[in-house]
Image (tube, grey):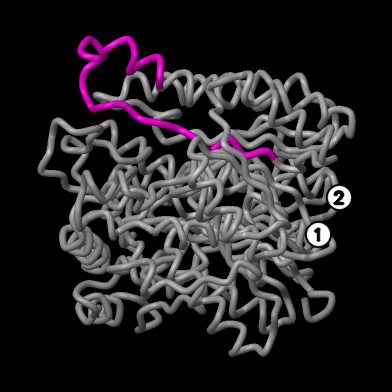
């Protein structure tokens, strides 16, 4: 930080458009901004541009999916942990949502629209309010709604309903929180020149419609909305709460409302958004990142990341940790081991191959330790725990249960008993053995973090993964139960590593696997994120930031494991 900022603000959807312009407006006034966005490359590019533009280090980015409760909570926590305070929460992230005709709108698209445009606003408001109340801060919350929330029409039934919900939610929140000095307002932009509005890289028709119909003969710019948001966050708006500030160039005042369904400007907006979505194809994954931007052809070649920007204190030598990692010989375990060692932390790891253990020991040296251990064998784990804790006086600060195995992709009734037993023993009993044998030593110290690797298939379901899903759903339940048994100062969490271009993903999906980060790139996110887990996270189901996004995969092998690759 360059010094005490005038306003510390969290901005969702901050990589571009209105969110980015709001960051500019706040930084220009000496503030500090924490941007969250699902578009990871754009997020880091935004931070780099803003830091150069304002010659400041008070600008940060954290990959954030606002539809993921844990991801959004992490963004708010990141701001508070970095600066010690939070002054403003700007719930801006959004996309066009469902724009289909009412009779053609599916229940799924309706739910997806509300999850992104309404539920995320509720969560952001709730998380920020908890901070304001805890720290006794008279904070400001600004929610980005839309003219579509003031009147139905060209915005589509789902989109208009979601934005209307945001407006009334803002009023309700303002009514409840005013007694604590917390203000909650929203802005309702009209036709604004954002990436969501653009068609084929241009917006000439939209500009022409705005110039022909609005009292202010111009298309709005993100900076116009940003100025309104910055005002509502400032002391100048100290007596304003529960309001919906319309930023539309006078379109509403002139009437008829542009979202009436027949107004030329409303039609132009709808046409631009609909064409944009048609060109992009169906939204990938849960449909919340349709405006994400182009995906790098190769994460490993085109994506640059600095872990120190994500969690500045994670690699501090003063906070050197001892991290135990199972399955350290390959894949995610090996990549995580390398990154943590590079950051100056001590790694003790295991795998089943004695030959591979010898190679790891030669590679990483005597400051780290590796053993041949089968985590499914309680005796083997028990002996390792005794050796580390009693003979070497080495009790891990963080215990990472990563080792796992899979089974052939086939229906439950076609699985052989030994296949099921092997998966359950390694994936579920392994973490239980680790926790049972290492926790007594960690409890004596009354500190330590247990991180059990889960999976997308530990939180969702799919065909032909029944035994694997059973093991990972078991991990989720076991870990939540364990979390209730731990004393203050300790934590047990599950961690979904994300969708990674692992060997398994490459075998099943070929070239499409390159859409996802390699284990090495993944470790750049995962290592600092892992080190940031604290006792406050106890019982949470976490996901490595930015790694749970589903870009879509095509497989020519329908009988292989899973058509849903979220857990691959």
Magenta residues?
A: 399-422
Residue that carries the numbered disc 1 in the rendered image = 85
Q: Quadrant of residue 524?
A: bottom right
Q: Quadrant of residue 469?
A: top left
| Residue drawn at (79%, 34%) of the image | 490
Q: Earlier in the sequence, mark 1 or mark 2?
A: 1
Residue that carries the numbered disc 2 in the rendered image = 135
Q: Position of residue 521 (x, y in %)?
A: 46, 62
Q: What kind of element bears circle 1?
A: loop
Q: What kind of element bears circle 2?
A: helix
Q: Are marks 1 and 2 in contact (CB under 8 Å)?
A: yes
Confirm whether residue 484 shows in the render: yes
Q: Position of residue 392 (x, y in %)?
A: 82, 41
In terms of depth relative to the viewer, which is nearer, 512 or 436? Answer: 436
Tell me, for residue 560, which label it has, or none. Answer: none
Neighbour tally class for label 1: few under 14, some 14-19, many 20 plus, Cα within 10 Å:
some
| Residue drawn at (37%, 74%) of the image | 302
Neighbour tally class for label 2: few under 14, some 14-19, many 20 plus, Cα within 10 Å:
few
Residue 301 vs residue 361: left or right? left
- Number of labels in the image equals 2
């Amino acid at each position: 930080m360059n010094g005490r900022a005038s306003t510390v603000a969290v901005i969702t959807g901050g990589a571009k458009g209105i969110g980015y312009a709001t960051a500019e407006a706040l930084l220009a006034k000496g503030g500090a901004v924490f941007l969250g966005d699902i578009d990871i490359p754009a997020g880091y590019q935004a931070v780099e541009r803003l830091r150069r533009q304002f010659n400041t280090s008070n600008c940060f980015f954290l990959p954030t999916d606002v539809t993921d409760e844990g991801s959004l909570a992490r963004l708010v926590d990141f701001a508070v942990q970095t600066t010690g305070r939070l002054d403003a929460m700007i719930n801006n992230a959004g996309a066009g949502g469902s724009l289909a005709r009412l009779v053609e709108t599916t229940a799924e698209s309706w739910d997806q629209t509300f999850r992104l445009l309404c539920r995320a606003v509720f969560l952001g408001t709730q998380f920020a309010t908890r901070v304001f109340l805890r720290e006794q801060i008279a904070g400001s919350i600004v929610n980005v709604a839309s003219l579509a929330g003031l009147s139905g029409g060209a915005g589509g039934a789902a989109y208009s309903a979601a934005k209307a919900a945001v407006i009334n939610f803002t009023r309700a929140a303002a009514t409840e929180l005013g007694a604590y000095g917390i203000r909650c307002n929203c802005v309702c932009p009209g036709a604004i020149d954002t990436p969501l509005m653009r068609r084929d890289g241009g917006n000439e028709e939209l500009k022409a419609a705005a110039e022909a119909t609005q009292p202010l003969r111009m298309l709005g710019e993100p900076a116009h909305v940003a100025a309104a948001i910055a005002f509502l966050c400032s002391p100048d708006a100290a007596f304003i709460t529960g309001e919906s500030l319309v930023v539309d160039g006078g379109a509403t005042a002139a009437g008829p409302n542009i979202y009436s369904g027949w107004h030329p400007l409303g039609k132009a907006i709808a046409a631009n958004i609909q064409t944009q979505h048609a060109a992009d194809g169906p939204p990938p994954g849960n449909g919340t990142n349709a405006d994400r931007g182009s995906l790098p052809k190769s994460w490993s070649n085109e994506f640059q990341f600095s872990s120190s920007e994500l969690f500045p204190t994670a690699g501090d030598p003063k906070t050197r940790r001892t991290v135990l990692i199972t399955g350290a010989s390959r894949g995610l375990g090996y990549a995580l081991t390398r990154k943590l060692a590079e950051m100056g932390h001590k790694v003790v790891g295991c795998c089943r191959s004695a030959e591979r253990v010898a190679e790891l020991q030669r590679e990483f040296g005597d400051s780290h330790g590796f053993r041949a251990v089968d985590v499914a064998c309680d005796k083997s784990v028990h002996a390792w725990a005794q050796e580390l804790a009693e003979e070497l006086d080495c009790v891990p600060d963080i215990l990472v249960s990563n080792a796992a195995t899979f089974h052939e992709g086939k229906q439950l009734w076609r699985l052989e008993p030994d296949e099921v037993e092997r998966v359950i023993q390694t994936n579920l009993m392994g973490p239980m053995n680790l926790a049972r044998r290492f926790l007594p030593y960690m409890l004596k110290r009354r500190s330590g973090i247990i991180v059990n690797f889960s999976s997308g298939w530990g939180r969702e379901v799919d065909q032909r993964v029944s035994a694997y899903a059973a093991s990972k759903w078991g991990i989720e339940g076991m870990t939540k139960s364990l979390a209730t048994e731990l004393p203050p100062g300790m934590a047990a969490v599950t961690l979904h590593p994300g969708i990674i271009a692992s060997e398994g993903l490459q075998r099943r999906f070929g070239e499409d696997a390159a859409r996802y980060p390699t284990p090495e790139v993944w470790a750049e996110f995962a290592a600092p994120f892992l080190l940031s887990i604290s006792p406050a996270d106890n019982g949470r189901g976490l996901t490595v930031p930015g790694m749970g996004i589903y870009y879509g995969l095509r497989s020519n092998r329908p009988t292989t494991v899973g058509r849903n690759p979220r857990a691959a």
